[in-house]
Structure formats: structure tokens, C-alpha cells
Amino acid sequence: MKAATVGENGVVIADVDIPQPKPNEVLVKVRACGLNRADLMVASGLAHGRAGGVGTVIGLEWSGEVVEAGADVEGLVPGDRVMCSGNSGWAEYAVTDWARAAKIPANNMTFEQAATLPVALQTMHDAIITNGRLTKGESVLIQGASSGVGLLGLQIARALGAALVIGTSTNAGRRARLTEFGADLALNSSDPGWVDAVLEATDGKGVDLIVDQISGTLANQNMAATAICGRIVNVGRLGGTTGKFDFNLHALRRIDYIGVTFRTRSVEEVREITQRMHADLDGAVEAGDLSLPIDSTFALEDAGAAVEHMRANAHLGKIVLTIDG
């Protein structure tokens, strides 16, 4: 089969063997794939969890049709249209644990649309609901809100009844569109006055929850913008993996500072995360209340160009690969 793999100098389309599903896995004929920041790491030759290195098939999320189900698979049979997360998805066929494959809602959702959702749904449910413990009437700020994951986070916060939803983006054009996806206030996190703007919007209290996809140099500013006994969930580190940390400010504001990643979770933990997500959000997905715009589509053969388009950071929403046949 054809697959987008890591080469010595970038993405290479190669012929590889069709993977064989284990008893707990489904084999999926892939129709579309979503791009994520972690895919850039792998495409650049870096490791992301257990994935990485020359020859690795890239891809964290995809959609398609089940062609084979292992003996231990629950709730899925050949022919089911599914959206999936896992590894090695940028290929004509991919396998994943059955709990990471969900039936595509029967509301005329295309394979391309379905491929935009798995990672964002799992990430933001885990960050906002499970670890962030957001409740109706609270306030939330999402750093890096113009990414696909961030845009869905704005929508989830709004759907949960947040009283105030704030999103940040350093790009003026993308920042201007955040209100389309549920933000009441859109700020530039590179502007030194953004913390003051948050405090003004919250009557000096600060927000109850920050979902941080930036980290790096923003750690202390985030804490200054968080309410006493608020929560910060560290989801991403686009702004750097290290930075100064004001331990006194952390203690004075009694902030729960929570780090999350899927890379150190067991199969059982990921199953629990996905099952919780489906229980809480499937209704909103089926109703069309949670969706992501598709910025652009590329054929699998043009995966390298898709990676460069994401690396240029000029997109809003998701970049999608399509596979014919």
C-alpha cells in the first residue's frame, strides 16, 4: 500500500505492507486524514511518544471504513464508517485499538469532515472536562485558540455553558475570527497587556480555567490571569518546553497546574478517555454543534506539501489529506 513516511530529508511516499490487526484492533481503509502539530514533529524526524524515525508512517487521525475487526473488538464490524486516532494513519490502510475508532455520525458527515475531529475531541474533552473540571457559569481562556484543537475547545466551552470564553491568537486575521467559534473575547498573547484585559473582563478575579497550548514564556502570565483556586491545564508547548516559573505566585493563587499528554497513557487509560468523550460530546457532534472548518485539502501523494503548509502557520482550522480508491 501507499503511505506517507519519514524520509532522510522530509516526507516520502513509499510502498509498505498493509498492517495486520491484533485481536483488539480494527483495520481501516483510510479515506481522509487530519494533520496535527505532532505530525510535524514526526515528519521532521523527531519522536512523538513511541512514533518516530526514518521509515515511520506518519499520522495521528484518520477516517474510513472498517475492513477487518479483531476477535476482541466491541461494537464495530466491517463496513462501518469510522473516525479514528492512533498512529500510522497517513496510508491507504491503518489499524487502531477498537476504542479509538468511533462510528461517523449518520448526519451526512463526509470522511474529510470526520478526519478533523478525533484528536481535537479527545484532547479538549480531557483538558476542559476531565482535568479542567469546567462547570456551567465559569470562565475559560484557551491559549492558541486558532488551531483546530483550540477552535473546538472554544465550542466545547460554550456548549458546557461557560459564562465567559476567551481565546488567544498572535495572528490578527485568525484572532478576528475566534468569535465565530464561541469566543466572547479574542486577545493577542504576545501583547504585554493581555493579562490586564483578562482581569478587566473578569472584574479583577481572573479566569477559572486556562487551557494552555503555548506554555514556554507564558507560564507566569497565565498564573497572573488565573483566579485564586483556578486551574491551568498544560496541553501543548508551542511556545517552548521550558521557561521561568514564579512559585510564589503559584502558591499565592493556589492554582492547580495540570500537565496532560496521551504519550504516557496505557491502552486502558486511552479507552476510558475516549469512552468519556463519546458519552459527553457525541450528541453535540451529531447535532452539528461541534465541527471544524477545513482550511485546505491535499492528496496523500502531496503529504509533503501539506506538512509545509502547516509549518507555514498560515491556516485556520484543519488541513486534510484525501485518499482515493
Image (cartoon, rainbow, N blue to C red):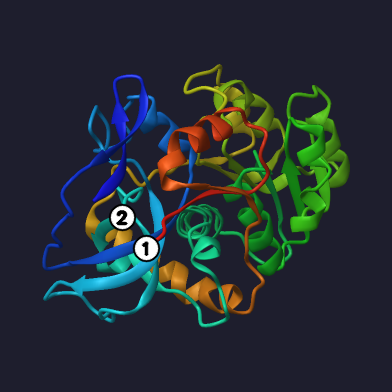
Q: Position of residue 116 (x, y in %)?
A: 52, 57
Q: Position of residue 309 (x, y in %)?
A: 57, 33
Amino acid at the residue labelled 1 = Gly
Task: Tell me if 158 is positioned left or right of 193 in this view.
Answer: left
Q: Which residue is mark 2?
A: 92
| Sequence-earlier tag: 1 or 2 | 2
Instruction: Out of 288 and 214, give the one closest to the viewer.
Output: 288
Decide: marks 1, 2 in contact (CB < 8 A)? yes
Q: Is residue 217 above or below residue 89?
A: above
Q: Which residue is mark 1?
A: 325
Residue 203 visible to an observer of this rendering: no
Instruction: Out of 63 and 51, give the one closest to the viewer.
Output: 63
- Which residue is pictured at 71% across the width and 68% down the height? 161
- Which residue is pictured at 45% across the width and 72% down the height? 278
Instruction: Out of 231 and 191, give the one closest to the viewer.
Output: 191
Q: Is residue 81 above or below residue 175?
A: below
Instruction: Out of 138 and 64, give the one closest to the viewer.
Output: 64
Q: Residues within 10 Å of mark 2 (few under 14, many from 20)?
A: many
Q: Position of residue 294 (x, y in %)?
A: 63, 54
